[in-house]
Image (cartoon, rainbow, N blue to C red):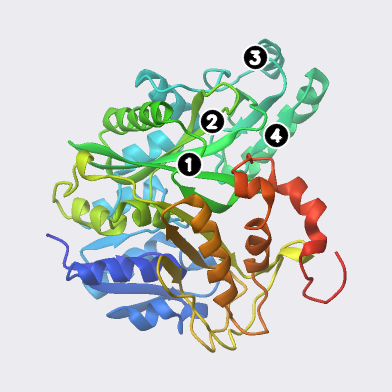
Amino acid sequence: MTIKKLLIANRGEIAVRIIRAARELGIRTVQVHSTADAGSLAVQMADEAVEIGPPSAAKSYLNIDAVLQAARESGADAIHPGYGFLAENADFADAVAAAGLIFVGPDGDTIRRMGDKTAAIATAQAAGVPTIPGSGGLIGDLGEAAEIAAGIGFPVMIKATAGGGGRGIRIAHDAAEFAALAPQAEREAKAAFGDGGLYLEKMIAKARHIEVQILGDGETFLHCYERECSLQRQRQKVWEEAPSAALSPHVRADLCASAVALAAAVGYRGAGTVEYLYDDETGAFFFIEMNTRIQVEHPVTEAVLGIDLLAEMIKVAGGEPLSLRQEDLVIRGHAIEVRINAEDPANGFMPSPGTVSELHIPGGPGVRFDHMLFAGYQIPPFYDSLLGKLVVTAETREKAIIRLRRALGELSLGDQVKTTAPLFDALARDDDVLAGAFHTKWLEPWLEANCHTLTRQDGEAC
């Protein structure tokens, strides 16, 4: 292992998770932090900590120069970006390499290639991976684009090539709507991402969102099976599970093989995820994008396979070959992860920063809680509201849901912070969820119809 000291260019629960993985590998850690995170759990746990700026992420966690300066000052020889912030920033990966440091993840060229949606689709097609019917690349003249949209068949999705996280998307149901939305999408993409490039995709009604975890060391590539992430709000995942209850063994094999083919096509190094839409009605699956980083929901894969994805990607970055073989990876049981956010689901998911006045962490067989909390912690209002991820594992999906309800009942952060835990308790009792009968557009209508089952922070009715 060539890595001796690892700098974590992130915060929150993923920073804690990386510190733990590094410690088990005998690697010292350096935690960078903003002034708002000076007392965070990651800062307390790391061997060293370096302040890199004020609370604003743009002036701290997104400040490449500050992160690299912290690495130089601390003597770190590698940087792990976690997820979010700079994790899929190709220029950052290049800058880390140019500074003579190891970037824990794929190189800048791979990030750039797979981060551009149209380039990623072309790469997938060349690798034989099924893609959604669409424009086949960037659209040019909007008049010509309207003809392409009509040829694809409405509804169509107008997507920003530089978009991500569900942003930069418009849905047109007919030609008139397309004429109105396409220019709007172009302007918004330019403003938000600095790139107004658009492409079109056929919209698949009631699609499931299924992703395959992959690992590569540049020569060997393998899959860690799939996760289902169909329960989403505003295109953001809230509940993930592995394996998907929707796939037949034949479809699972084809899906995972296609993800490995794509990883091999780009010579992938590290942990990544290939995301797909799955059509329940036809059994067809289509490539959406590749995430060139560790995912928030990686623990459900670790839970059913008994592996450590973070340790594996650190070892690969340090020059070691993959320690896993495809035949060693066998699914055992079922795992579910729910994202515990500091939000009030009964009040429009209003952010709920505050003090964790007490902390009761669920325990017992098959329960894992990845978090960044401690009693007395003041949740800062400057960042993503994710506090932790509650993960349960059991022999069957039915037993995992029962265990999830039990674990949610044990979780408490005191009375000052509202969380999304009541939402998941309600979902874990819903007939459709129990049957696995949902899709990416299922949750938002459910929220409108079932708000009365939740309790608002101010005590008022929804």
Against 334, residue 424 (above or below) is below
Q: Position of residue 363 (x, y in %)?
A: 44, 75
Circle 3 sits on which residue?
Answer: 152
Q: Which mark is residue 278?
A: 2
What is the three-letter code of the residue carrying label 3?
Ile
Circle 4 sits on which residue?
Answer: 170
| 48 left or right, relative to 404 | left
Q: Position of residue 49 (x, y in %)?
A: 34, 79
Which quadrant does the N terminus fall into? bottom left
Where disc 3 sits, the SS reads: helix
| 417 left or right, relative to 319 | right
Closer to the chain start, of discs 4 and 1, is 4
Circle 1 sits on which residue?
Answer: 244
Against 365, residue 214 (above or below) is above
Does residue 261 appear anywhere in the picture? yes
Residue drawn 40% across and 69% down?
365
Label 4 near label 2: C-beta < 8 Å? no
